[in-house]
Amino acid sequence: MALEQLCDVVQRCQAIKDEGFSPEDYDLFFTAGRTCIEQGNSAQVLSILVDETNKNIVRCMGWNLLGPIVQILLKKEDRNLHHCHAILTHLLEVCSPKELLVGLLEQMEEADTGSITETVNLLLKPLQTVLLRMGMKKASSVGMALSTLLSQVARLPVPVTKEEEEEDACGLCHCCTALLQFVKPFVEEIKEGVKDNNRISKDNELRVELLKFCMKSLSNPLLEVQLKDPDTLLKSPLRDFATEILIILSSIGESLPDLLSRNVLKRREVPGFLEEEVRYPKESLACLSHLLFVDHIAVDIFPAVLSPIFVLQCNMEYTDLLLSRTEESRLQKGLALYEKSLIRVEDNSLPVDLLELKTFFSVPQNLVKVMTLCPDQTLRTKSLKVFQLSIDKFNTEAKYKFFKGMLKTSHHAGVEGYIIKNIKNQIDFSLKPCNGNDWFLGKHLLPLLRLVLCFPHGPETDLLQNLDRIMESLNLLRYLLIRDKEWENETGIWTELYKIEDSYLKPLRTGLNMSKAHYEAELKSVKENKKISSKDTKASVCTVTVDNEKLPNMTPEMQIQVLQSAVFTFDLIESVLTRIEEIIETKERPLS
């Protein structure tokens, strides 16, 4: 029945000249042709299509059969598969390239996640054939095809382990390798243009589409991938894909050093129809930088002539972008890029002027967020290591300014405590012979000490919440009083001591006595209540409020443990505070 309908519509259309077919003709041809193919009559359909008499009909309407043909080929079950392949080949030769492109891309877009790899594998070669038929006017079509393909490939899960990449169960590695073969003739066309003219216009449309392909590949999948070291995985399709993307960039006239330094050199005047932020997305450039400096991809085409400080400056914006995200893969890459950029810089060499740049303020702030908020212990530990590494690279004046800025903006007792510990180390270094400087001794040090030894909320300050800062501050003050003799007063601490006593030590002592008395009374009360209720068969519970937030109900035993821990903490603070008071009292006591 369907075959008869197809023969009828074809016979009727043979008498129609040019492209004067009606919508009804298109519908009948498609419906009958699809049914024939689905019913296994592909051989008969093929004989109708290859008949020279029907060439005009096939040229105009044949592309409509792409859908049913592709579905049969994807199933790989039909006994007439070779006839379907022959039909597809004939359609690619006869039909309009533009209509074929639309039809093939529709099939690509309709692929579900489970069939993306098979669809890519089936359609890449036909797509390439169609695009090459378009001659010099294919640029926008190449761009449309690449965009569709990458959007589909981006849906595939990224292999995490070496074994997953080797197995490639979801097909991402295969698709990436196939994409490289797909773009090869278009890259070669640009290279030939460069060879013939020694250069190519930045706004050559095909070049721009290939650039967009590279940039999109960098942002996804490559930014999502943790590439394996060659020692771990000798043959890595994803590493090969990353390498080829960088080679393509270089082949189409993009200088890798220029790409890296775009943000530093502020190149905003880009001629052409594409704005710079669209042409060079920051996420893509961040991935490019990671590939170059962390994965060491394409090092043979990247000249090692840039100074370490300049490279660091270039990478700060990319580091900032990666560390501002919450995905662990982004944080991991941001930390690795920052670390590799810092390692190449000599210790104590970064000048204070760099702190005027926005990224040299925002990157430490993002590091603090990772250190304090990231749920992954490994990343928190790594971020602290990189944070210290960044401090070590600043010169003395820059360290001083950095410490002041962090004390004013971090708003986290643990981070502030860590900064104060670093301040102590710098003072200790400065007090040693031949190490004296203007920043961690004398008049410049005192404003920094005032930031350290302050009690903004007076006796009402939450001592438990601010424990790390308080302990490091007390340890620093004790160190200064012991290390810096009163008659030398290199740090100026003895001149400032009376102010420190009034603004810091006395409020701390008051707050400590109040807190300790309160917690000891609470502890005593809970213990007594526990004795009274010990005969009760039902375990009693109570509610504890910390920092105005109610915690889950706690048994008396749990509450006793919490209160005892708090009292122990107060004893710890008091031991250091008492030692400082003793030192001051000894110094102030008149000689008998």
Image (cartoon, rainbow, N blue to C red):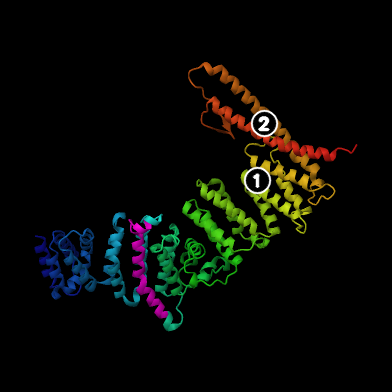
Compared to residue 422, the image places residue 129 above or below, namely below
Q: Type of residue at label 2?
A: Ser
Q: Is residue 190 magenta?
A: yes
* Residue at horizontal 67 percent and vertical 48 percent from the top: 421
Q: Nearer the viewer, mark 2 or mark 1?
A: 1
* Residue at horizontal 53 percent and vertical 72 percent from the top: 303
Which mark is on residue 527? Answer: none
Residue at disc 1, secondary structure: helix
Which mark is on residue 515? Answer: 2
Q: Residue 371 location in percent, x, y?
A: 56, 48
Q: Is residue 295 visible?
A: yes
Residue at disc 2, secondary structure: helix
Tag 1 or tag 2, which sits nearer the N-term?
1
Q: Residues within 10 Å of mark 1 (few under 14, many from 20)?
A: many
Q: Using the rendered view, name the quadrant where residue 252 is placed.
A: bottom left
Residue sitting farthest toward the right: 592
* Residue at horizontal 71 percent and vertical 58 percent from the top: 397
Q: Residue 556 location in percent, x, y?
A: 55, 25
Q: Using the rendered view, name the quadrant where residue 249 is placed.
A: bottom left
Q: Which quarter shows the N terminus?
A: bottom left
Asked if the residue under mark 1 is in contact with the one under mark 2, i.e. CB atoms within 8 Å, the reply is no
Provide the major secondary structure of the magenta segment. helix
> Observer-nearest residue: 208 or 495?
495
Which mark is on residue 417? Answer: 1
Q: Residue 81 location in percent, x, y?
A: 18, 64
Q: Which residues are magenta?
A: 164-193
* Residue at horizontal 56 percent and vertical 58 percent from the top: 339
Q: Which quarter shows the C terminus?
A: top right
Q: Residue 545 location in percent, x, y?
A: 57, 31
Q: Type of residue at label 1?
A: Gly
Q: Is residue 543 visible?
A: no
Q: Is residue 332 magenta?
A: no
